[in-house]
Image (tube, helix red, strand yellow):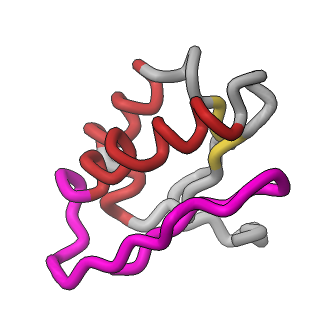
Amino acid sequence: MVWDVCSWRDMGNIRLDTSRDDSDRYLSILSDHLHSFMSIVHSDGLGQFQKDNATPHASRVATKWLQEHSSDIRHFHWRAKSPEMNII
């Protein structure tokens, strides 16, 4: 799995992981990498997170984590496996 975070303000560290991409792994990436990036780079609250809605990314635990941290991290609500164009 390759995971990265970027914005118009800065680039985050790319994360390479050979383990299976599952919801628990994704949750640890959100808490370890995304949260710190957003709190440093977008401390003004203007940043928005967009995920690609792969199955682990749209899991209940990941969705719950994003809801619990909605005061720190705003994110686009994108339907899972949406046929609409995703900017990612």
Which span of residues is magenta-colored? 1-25
Residue drawn at the location 32% of the way across and 48% of the way down: 59
**Does the segment drawn in magenta span residue 19?**
yes
Q: Residue furthest bottom?
A: 18
Residue drawn at the location 50% of the way across and 60% of the way down: 53
Could you tell me residue 63's position as x and y percent? Answer: 40, 37
Task: Report the side of 69 relative to 16 (left or right).
Answer: right
Nearest the eye: 40 or 54 = 40
Could you tell me residue 4's position as x and y percent? Answer: 52, 67
Could you tell me residue 51's position as x and y percent? Answer: 56, 57
Q: Residue furthest top?
A: 71
Task: Report the side of 34 relative to 10 (left or right).
Answer: left
Residue drawn at the location 26% of the way across and 78% of the way down: 17
Above or below, comparing residue 76 to residue 3 in the picture: above
Quadrant position of residue 72:
top right
Residue drawn at the location 39% of the way across and 56% of the way down: 57
Nearest the eye: 48 or 64 = 48
Query: Majority secondary structure of the magenta segment?
Result: loop
Nearest the eye: 84 or 32 = 32
Q: The C terminus lies in which quarter of the figure?
A: bottom right
**Does the segment drawn in magenta span residue 47?**
no
Q: The N terminus lies in which quarter of the figure?
A: bottom left
Count of labels in the image: 0
Task: Report the side of 27 relative to 6 (left or right).
Answer: left
Above or below, comparing residue 17 to residue 13 in the picture: below
Could you tell me residue 54's position as x and y percent? Answer: 43, 67
Above or below, comparing residue 67 to residue 23 in the picture: above
